[in-house]
Structures are given as C-alpha cells and as structure tokens.
Image (cartoon, rainbow, N blue to C red):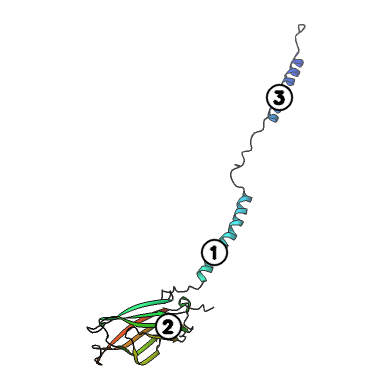
Amino acid sequence: MPEGTPGPRTSAVRTTAARAAALALSAALLAGCQLPDVSMSPDLPTGDDVAAASETARPTAARRTAATAAVAAAPSTPDRPAGDLDSGSLTRTLPAGDRTVVVDYWTADQATTWTAEDDKTIQLAAHVEGGDTGDSRGDETPEVLVTRFAVTGDDGTTRTLVTEDRGEFALTPPFSYTTALSLPGAPSAATALSLSVQFDLLVETEPGSARYYRQTVLDTLELPLLQEDPS
C-alpha cells in the first residue's frame, strides 16, 4: 500500500463519523422547528364546551315551557264592552211629537267597576224642549204632564220593575222631572243589566183647553258588569 493512502479501516471509521454527524444535525434541526398541532381545530368547540352549553340551555328551555304553560292555564276574563254610564253621565234626546224630551242620567259611582252583586244608584232629570211655545199673545204654553214613570231591569234571566211613579207631574218648561234609581244586586252570573225607561205624558191640545192627548217616550240604558274572579 503506498504511503499516505488511508486503509479500508480508516475509511470505514470516517464514513461512520460522517453519518453520525449528519444524524446529529438533523436531530438539532427538528428540535428547533416545532410543527403546529393540527389534531383539532381551535375554532371548534370541544366536547366539554358542547356539554356545558347543553346543560345551560336545558333550564332556559324548561323556564320557557313553564311560562307558556302558566299563560295557557291562566283563566281568561271576557272583555267588558263599553257601557252607557262609563263616563259617569249621559244625555239622551228623545222625540215626542213636535217636542223632545231631554233626559240627563248620571251616577256618583264608578260604573266601569260595577259587578252583578253591587248596589247601584243612578239619578236622572227630564225636561221638555221645542213644540208649541204658546198662543198668539205668547203668554201661555200647552201643559205637559208626566202621569207615569217606570223603569224595568233585565239581567238576562229576570225582568224586575225597579221603580214606578204615578201622578200628574208638571213637565211644562221651566219644570223638570227628577228622580233617583236604586238598583239592587243581580245574580253573580249576570254579565249586563239593561234598563228600560218609560215616560207616559199627557200633552194639552192647546193652551188652557184642559184637553189632553197621551204620548209615551221610551229609552234604554245598557250597563255591562264585571265578572268576579272565581278564585
């Protein structure tokens, strides 16, 4: 073997050393470069997150179901229609031949809160307008008399005579007919009270003649009633 030429053993040692150095360099490079963890997307909820959200949603859904059931189970109160005395007073103009009978109704009660069993008080005043104002001298007018005033109440099951007043009551201007109605309680199932009002009039044919003709004037009041809570 010529001098200066490495032998087979020396070459093998150098080859092994070179491979070891290459492996060490590869390991160092891998240690300094970390690959991202792509096993699970960070934007997606984990199993624990889904379970927690599900547990949170269950009480909310249960509360909604309970609220819906409570609304459905609550007893519904029928709507109360408007009544003639809801504002506290009412004026009616009723025809009576060539005259009109003007009737003012009012109450000191709160009519919108009336129930069937409540006692109710209504006042009224009636007077005459128009018609013959007198003879050619203008110093006399035909006499107008109320001979009967009656009110009948109807609660849907029973008709009752609330009041009846008979006599000869002057209605010739400037006089008026005034009275008060006391309405007793009705059966608790009643939803409204209807009042039929009647004036029977005697009207003089001409001033001073002492001869009369009869006229009947009718009116109706509708009084809705609140339904009491059965509970």
Please identify the quarter of the rendering in which residue 80 is found: bottom left
Q: Nearer the viewer, mark 1 or mark 2?
A: 2
Q: Which residue is mark 1?
A: 65
The residue depicted at 54 percent of the width and 64 percent of the height is 65
Total numbered labels placed on residues in the image: 3
The residue depicted at 35 percent of the width and 78 percent of the height is 92
Q: Is residue 34 above or below residue 15?
A: below
SS type, badge 3? helix
Q: Is residue 81 above or below residue 196?
A: above
Which numbered disc covers residue 25? 3
Front residue (pair 110, 57): 110
Amino acid type, callout 1: Thr
Mark 3, residues whose alpha carbon is within 10 Å: few (<14), some, or many (≥20)?
few
Please identify the quarter of the rendering in which residue 162 is found: bottom left
Q: Position of residue 127 (x, y in %)?
A: 34, 82
Mark 2, residues whose alpha carbon is within 10 Å: few (<14), some, or many (≥20)?
some
Residue 84 visible in the shown view: no
Amino acid type, callout 2: Gln
Asked if residue 219 lies left or right of residue 71, the reply is left
Q: Which of the two labelled residues, at mark 1 and mark 2, occupies the earlier sequence position?
A: 1
